[in-house]
C-alpha cells in the first residue's frame, strides 16, 4: 500500500517551531517512501479559531519549500460536517456512542464535589449524577432530542486494557477505567478533534500518523473509535518534544524571548509576531536541516544536509524517543554552513529578497557595489565574504567598508597597545603610502611588501603582525574582514592610498 501522511494543525494561532518540525518529518517520510503528504486544517473548534492562522500555516510551509496547496492535497474539517454526521449515526445505532444532555454548569457542580469524577462506565448510568441515553426513558429521550441541546459521547467499557503500538515507543498500554467517555459531537453539531481526526485519517487513507508526543494520551480514544468502526488502525509515531535551551521543559515563547530568537517561522502583523526566523535571516533549507536533526540521528557524523539529501537519507529507525534541546547557536552555525554552499547568484537572490522585504525598492548595498565596482568585482567580493555570513543580515556589515570610507573609532586601541608614542605606526603608514604611490599592485608583490613591513616593525621594537593590523585598520576601520591582500586588490591603489592618508592624519592628531 502506498504511504500517505498528513500534517494536521489547528488554526488557533501562529504555527510554532514544534509544529514545523512535525510537518518536516511528515514530508521527509513521504518523500523517502514515495508516498503522499497532505495538509489538513483541523478547524472544528470555531470558538478558538484565530483569523489569519490558516494563511500563516500555508505561507510557512511554502517558505520551507515542503508544501504548496493543491486541490488534491488539502482539506478543512469545517467543510466535512456532513461526513461526520454520517459516521456518528453508525456509532449511535450500534451502541458505541450515546446522547448526553448534561449542562456544563451541572458537570461543573459535580466536579466541585468530586474532583476525581469521570464521565465513563462508572458514572454514566447513575441517573442521580448525569442525564443521558442510559438514564432516560425512551419517551423522555425522544422529547429531549427534539427540544434540548446535547453532545454525543463515546462509550468506553470498564476493566479493559487497551494496547496500541507506536513505532517509536513500542506497545503502550492504557486502562479503560482511566478514560472518560469523550465528547465526539459538540452541542453546536461540530465534531471534536478526536472524532474528526479518526474519521478523516480513515477516509483520506492515511497510513501513518506522525505527530507530537503530546497526543500520546489521545491514542486509546482514537483506538476505540477505530475499533468501533472495525477499521484498521494506521501506524503511529509520536515525535519527542523540542526542549528549552536548558533541556528542561518544552520550548516556549518565553525561552525564545530570553534567548533573543523567534519560535515562529514568519513575521505577521495579524499574529502579532514582529520577527520570524525568516526575517532574522534564516535560510529555509538550514532550518529544515536543523529541525530534522532534533530527535533524529542519521547514524553518521554528517550534520549538514540539503533538502534533497534529507529526502533520501531520512528513515524512522533514526528517530529518538528523548526530546532534544533547542540550541540557537547551533542553528546559526548550520545556517552559516548553508551560506557557504550557496553560489554568488544565489546569495544575490537571497539578499535582494531580504532587502525588498525590509526596505522595499530602495537602493541597497548590492546596488552600490555594482555601481562602484561593476558586476565582475562585485561577484568576487560576494564569493569572498559569503563564508562569513551567519545570516543574510551580515551582508551589509561585510561589504560596508568596500562602499564607504571607514572611521577609525577602534584605531586607538591598536596604536596604544603596541606603541604609546605612535612613532612606529607613523613610520609604517609612511612606508605603506610610499609603496602605494610607486608600486603596481599584484598579489605576489603585496605579500613581499607585507613581509618587509613585518621586518621593519620588529626592528623598531614592535610585534611583527602590527603592520598587517595597521594596514587593515586603514582600509576597513577595524581588524575584521576578509584576506587583506584581496581587500587591497579590490579597493585599488587610489582608494587604498586615500584611506592610508586618512588613518595617518587621525593618528597624527591623536
Image (cartoon, grey):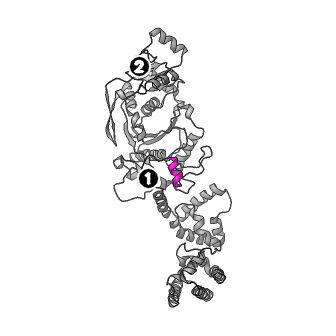
Residue 478, disc: none
Q: Earlier in the sequence, mark 2 or mark 1?
A: 2
Residue denoted by label 1: 246
Give percent across and percent down for residue 127. Answer: 43, 14
Q: Is residue 84 above or below residue 58?
A: above
Left or right: where 1 falls relative to 87? left
In this view, the residue in front, 232 or 104, is 104
Give percent across and percent down for residue 473. Answer: 58, 77
Give percent across and percent down for residue 82. Answer: 51, 25
- Which residue: 47% across, 19% down? 100
Q: Is residue 31 above or below residue 78?
A: below
- Which residue: 53% across, 34% down? 43
Q: Assign a secondary structure to mark 1.
A: loop
- Which residue: 34% across, 55% down? 299
Give percent across and percent down for residue 317. Answer: 33, 48
Which region of the structure is painted magenta?
Answer: 251-269
Report, in whole angstroms, how far the alpha carbon at label 2 lies from the one at label 1.
45 Å
Q: Name the quadrant containing residue 471.
A: bottom right
Q: In the rendered structure, are the residues bearing label 2 and label 1 in contact, judged by CB atoms less than 8 Å apart?
A: no
Badge count: 2
Examine the rendering and report whether any part of residue 87 can be seen. Answer: no
Q: Is residue 207 magenta?
A: no
Which residue in the rendered view is the most extreme toward the top? 139
Residue denoted by label 2: 124
Which residue in the rendered view is the most extreme toward the right? 362
Image quarter in which the C terminus is found = bottom right
Instruction: Answer few, some or many: residues within 10 Å of disc 1's Cα (few below 14, many 20 plus, some between 14 and 19).
Output: few
Left or right: where 429 falls relative to 103? right
Q: Name the quadrant containing residue 235.
A: top left
In this view, the residue in front, 390 or 337, is 390
- Which residue: 51% across, 32% down? 77
Q: Name the quadrant containing residue 220.
A: top left
Amino acid at each position: 500500500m502506498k504511504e500517505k501522511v498528513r500534517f494536521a494543525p489547528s488554526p488557533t494561532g501562529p504555527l510554532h517551531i514544534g509544529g514545523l518540525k512535525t510537518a518536516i518529518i511528515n514530508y521527509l517520510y513521504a518523500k523517502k517512501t514515495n508516498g503522499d503528504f497532505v495538509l489538513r486544517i483541523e478547524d472544528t473548534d470555531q470558538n478558538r479559531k484565530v483569523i489569519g492562522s490558516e494563511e500563516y500555516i500555508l505561507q510557512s510551509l511554502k517558505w520551507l519549500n515542503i508544501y504548496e496547496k493543491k486541490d488534491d492535497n488539502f482539506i478543512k474539517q469545517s467543510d466535512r460536517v456532513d461526513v461526520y454526521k454520517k459516521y456518528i449515526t453508525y456509532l449511535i445505532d450500534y451502541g458505541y456512542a450515546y446522547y448526553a444532555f448534561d449542562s456544563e454548569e451541572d458537570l461543573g457542580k459535580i466536579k466541585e464535589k468530586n474532583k476525581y469524577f469521570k464521565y465513563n462506565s462508572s458514572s454514566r448510568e447513575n441517573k442521580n449524577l448525569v442525564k443521558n441515553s442510559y438514564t432516560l426513558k425512551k419517551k423522555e429521550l425522544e422529547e429531549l432530542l427534539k427540544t434540548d441541546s446535547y453532545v454525543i459521547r463515546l462509550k468506553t467499557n470498564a476493566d479493559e486494557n487497551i494496547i496500541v503500538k507506536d513505532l517509536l515507543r513500542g506497545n503502550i498500554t492504557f486502562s479503560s477505567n482511566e478514560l472518560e467517555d469523550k465528547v465526539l459531537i459538540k452541542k453546536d453539531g461540530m465534531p471534536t478533534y478526536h472524532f474528526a481526526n479518526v474519521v478523516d485519517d480513515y477516509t483520506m487513507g492515511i497510513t501513518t500518523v506522525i505527530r507530537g508526543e503530546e497526543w500520546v494520551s489521545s491514542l486509546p480514544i482514537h483506538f476505540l473509535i477505530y475499533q468501533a468502526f472495525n477499521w484498521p488502525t494506521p501506524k503511529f509515531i509520536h515525535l519527542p518534544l523540542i526542549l528549552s535551551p536548558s533541556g528542561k521543559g518544552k520550548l516556549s515563547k518565553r525561552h525564545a524571548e530570553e534567548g533573543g530568537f523567534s519560535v515562529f517561522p514568519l513575521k505577521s502583523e495579524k499574529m502579532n509576531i514582529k520577527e520570524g526566523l525568516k526575517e532574522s535571516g534564516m535560510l529555509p533549507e538550514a532550518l529544515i536541516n536543523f529541525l530534522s536533526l532534533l530527535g533524529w540521528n542519521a547514524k553518521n557524523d554528517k550534520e549538514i544536509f540539503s533538502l534533497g539529501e534529507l529526502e533520501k537519507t531520512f528513515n524512522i529507525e533514526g528517530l529518538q524517543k528523548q526530546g532534544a534541546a533547542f540550541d540557537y547557536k547551533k542553528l546559526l552555525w548550520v545556517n552559516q554552513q548553508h551560506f557557504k554552499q550557496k553560489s554568488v547568484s544565489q546569495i544575490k537572490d537571497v539578499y535582494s529578497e531580504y532587502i525588498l522585504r525590509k526596505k522595499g525598492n530602495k537602493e541597497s548595498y548590492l546596488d552600490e557595489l555594482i555601481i562602484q565596482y561593476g558586476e565582475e568585482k562585485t561577484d568576487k567580493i560576494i564569493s569572498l565574504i559569503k563564508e562569513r555570513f551567519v545570516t543574510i543580515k551580515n551582508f551589509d556589515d561585510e561589504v560596508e567598508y568596500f562602499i564607504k570610507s571607514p572611521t577609525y573609532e577602534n584605531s586607538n586601541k591598536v596604536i596604544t597597545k603596541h606603541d604609546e608614542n605612535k612613532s612606529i605606526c607613523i613610520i609604517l603608514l609612511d612606508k605603506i603610502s610610499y609603496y602605494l604611490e610607486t608600486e603596481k599592485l599584484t598579489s605576489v608583490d603585496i605579500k613581499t611588501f607585507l613581509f618587509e613591513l613585518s621586518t621593519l616593525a620588529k626592528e623598531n621594537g614592535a610585534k611583527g603582525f602590527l603592520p598587517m593590523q595597521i594596514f587593515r585598520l586603514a582600509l576597513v576601520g577595524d581588524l575584521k574582514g576578509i584576506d587583506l591582500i584581496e581587500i587591497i586588490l579590490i579597493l585599488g591603489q587610489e582608494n587604498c592610498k586615500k584611506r592610508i592618508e586618512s588613518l595617518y592624519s587621525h593618528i597624527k592628531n591623536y
